[in-house]
Image (tube, grey):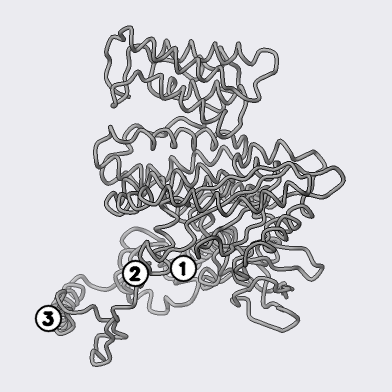
Amino acid sequence: MGSKDIFDEEDIKLINSEYDSLINNMVRCREPGDHELIEKAFNVANKAHWNLRRKSGEPYIIHPIAVAKIVNQEIGLGARSIATALLHDAVEDTDYTLEDVDRDFGPKIATLIDGLTKISSSTYDKGTTSSLQAENFRRMLLTLSDDLRVILIKIADRLHNMRTLDSMPEHKKMKVAGETIFLYAPLANRIGLYAIKSELEDLSFKYRQPGIYEEIASKMRLGEKKYYSLINKFSLPIINKLNESGLEFEITGRPKSIFSIWTKMQSKNVPFEEVYDVLAVRIIFDPLPGIPEKTTCWNIYSVITDTYLPKPDRLRDWVSRPKPNGYEALHLTVMGPEGHWVEVQIRSRRMDEIAERGYAAHYRYKGDNTPETELDKWIKKIRSMLENPLENPIEFLDEFKMNLFSSEIMVFTPKGTLVSLPKGASALDFAYEIHTEIGNKAIGAKINHKLNPIDTILMSGDQVEIITSDIAKPEREWLSYVCTSKAKEAIKSVLRVESTNRIQRGMQILEEKLAEIGESPNTEILRKLMQSYDIPNKDELYSGIELGTVNLDNLRKIIKKSPAKNVIKYWELKLLGSKKDKKEEEGARKGKIDPSSPFLLRENIENAGQSYEIAKCCNPIPG
């Protein structure tokens, strides 16, 4: 929220103009009462934000109006979502409360706004920043259990904030841009909002690496006329052939996004001039009666490959098997005019709307009896994560990011059911994906009819059968075998219960042993035991007793030990420790790496003769 300043005539004119633009260009708001609901929400929000300005100086209400436009015109949500977007900052930043929303607009809109409300106004405080941001993001995701529209409105809110980031201080620009590239852009992609995902990536890149961004952007501007000329030249023969087929279609072309070009430069380790597939063409068609969309996609593919030479390894068939976020299309890359590679995307009108508007369009086309899609399954996975959230919000965020960024593999059950898992998943991940109890009892796996251990990494197309045993149970090392949050949380849940039981059994054993010598547990006895066995806390002491690593045969001797002996032992440890510290310090000096010399990778510091120097052509990725 910015400063308070009396609006003048120009401000009022701007507010009315932006609101009129929203109303005059609305889509999907034809139900009785839709316009009245939106007008009421605008009037309430406008009154709440009256005379308040953003950091940019414009009236604050311009931001909620802009978010409402994105929600409706770019994502395709309806009247309730528009009203929520208009009101979302009123509850957060003014005297208008959630109770007021519930009273004026009903519980549905109040619930949506509650999901959008920030957890804390102090997210920029040092020391607590990352934890609060992580918890805030987790709280937002909790609305997946109720209404995914909250996520869509939040993405729209973030998109407008990114479009107007120039007026923010530098440290806030970097923070917002960082959150955007690592969380919001992948989330938009996963939900299927491709256009928004690309814009979020470009805007984040612009603020995080302005020099590189501007360099690529200027080169793109210089070649803009040439690019569009090539696209026109490429499209003309295809248009003529498709017209002959009687198909209703449209062809659009554009250069690829700046961020995607930079990503390609990084992955291929080439300069801008050597990125050849910077052009993309999209063909969107209206299906002919009685002809399946899939058939028409392949017919168009034939027309293109009859005209231009295809690159075989660049064919992507997401028509036969849609992406987990619901995306359907046929992608190919062909050699176009003047030796330029051109990527072509073939979609029906329905596929295009799902690609551009993601979740909103997906559920508009999905009927009650439609089979569960990969997007439905992914949403279920995230809900499952949120039902058992990790205690540390940052750990939760890491797990969620892993679910966002992971490439996916497809494996089969023995009965042929397809199961989607992140790349790098093991047979144990598969077991937990099928059912928690199968995971907990797993002892091995038959992969393509061959016996393998449970930590075997799976490949796309594998058929997997899990072998179980009633006496098997999760071990701590299992955590290193799995990569999915579902498997990790299931294993941790069992280990937590076992740890609690172990502590209780250890406590009981100690009480019985002390009773035999006429003692009962107290703080002094526990302190002596922990000191004697060099154990940092009571829980580890009790666990050690239950496991047998803490031997209580000398219990009487330990608790009767005189203070004098403790003092002697203290000085012995102190003197020995100081000698040991000196030796370690000398060893550390020998193994010290000179930061000015080439970076060395050493297997161990004692064997420093075996060192490796990274070659100039090597470009390792941190982490």
Disc 2 marks a residue whose amino acid type is Ile
The residue sitting at 51% across, 48% down in the picture is 254
3D distance between C-alphas at marks 2 and 3: 25 Å
Disc 1 marks a residue whose amino acid type is Ser
Q: Is residue 9 visible?
A: yes
| 568 relative to 306, above or below | below
Check disc 1 and report the residue beneath it: 543
Which of the two residues, 520 or 53, is positioned nearer the viewer here?
Answer: 53
Check disc 2 and report the residue beneath it: 535
Check disc 3 and report the residue beneath it: 582
The mark closer to the camera, 2 or 3, is 3
| 182 relative to 73, above or below | below
| Label 2: element kind | loop
| 353 relative to 516, above or below | above
Position of residue 420 measured from the top left corner of the image (x, y, whole percent): 66, 61
Position of residue 79 measured from the top left corner of the image (x, y, whole percent): 61, 22
Disc 3 marks a residue whose amino acid type is Lys
The residue sitting at 25% across, 42% down in the picture is 171
- Within 10 Å of disc 2 (Cα), the crowding (few <14, some 14-19, many 20+) is some
Q: Quadrant of residue 250?
A: top right
